[in-house]
Image (cartoon, rainbow, N blue to C red):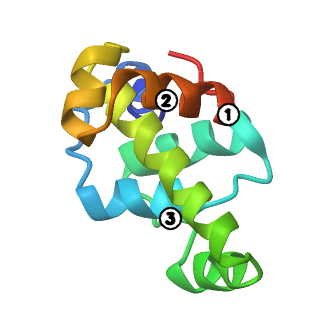
Amino acid sequence: MFNLFVNQSSISFNRTAPVIKETKLHQLMAWRWPGNVRELRNEAERFVLGIKSTITMGDISSDISSFSLMQTVEYFERGLIATELARHAGSLSRTAESLQVAKSTLSDKIKKYGLKF
């Protein structure tokens, strides 16, 4: 979804869409997004305009440190699955292959996390 907002913002601001580094994607996946979609859209606009992110690794570390081990694993697993689904345009087969899991396992996890593709 971040990529979509970056592309929309690039068009709105008549700028070339910047390349999103993998570390930035991991940082975005680790954030809880208390402002939900609006906050994600604002972050994409700042990214396109070259404005410093309001999310810091310190924020993420303190946010995640209150999670149990299982919650932390599920949090990152959800983000990874969402990223791979987007990367493979929603193809379950290609996503399952890239994650090296059975398609049925991936389908179960998509339902568990309420992911849309």
Where residue 24 sits, quadrant-wise, is bottom left
Q: Which mark is residue 21?
A: none
Q: Earlier in the sequence, mark 1 or mark 3?
A: 3
Q: Is residue 26 visible?
A: yes
Placement of 44 over or under 112, stated as above or below:
below
Residue shown at 69% from the left, 65% from the top: 71
**Residue labelled with disc 3:** 53
Q: Earlier in the sequence, mark 1 or mark 2?
A: 2
Instruction: From the viewer's side, name the closer residue of 58 and 52.
Output: 58
Q: Residue 99: x, y in percent?
A: 27, 41
Give the SS element for disc 1: helix
Q: Earlier in the sequence, mark 3 or mark 2?
A: 2
**Residue labelled with disc 1:** 112
Residue shown at 36% from the left, 19% from the top: 11
Residue shown at 61% from the left, 61% from the top: 31
Cα distance between the residues tagged 1 and 2: 19 Å
Where residue 14 sits, quadrant-wise, is top left
Instruction: From the viewer's side, name the closer residue of 72 and 87.
Output: 72
Residue shown at 39% from the left, 60% from the top: 26
Give the SS element for disc 2: loop
Q: Amino acid at mark 2?
A: Met
User: From the viewer's perspective, is 67 left or right of 42?
Assistant: right
**Residue labelled with disc 2:** 1
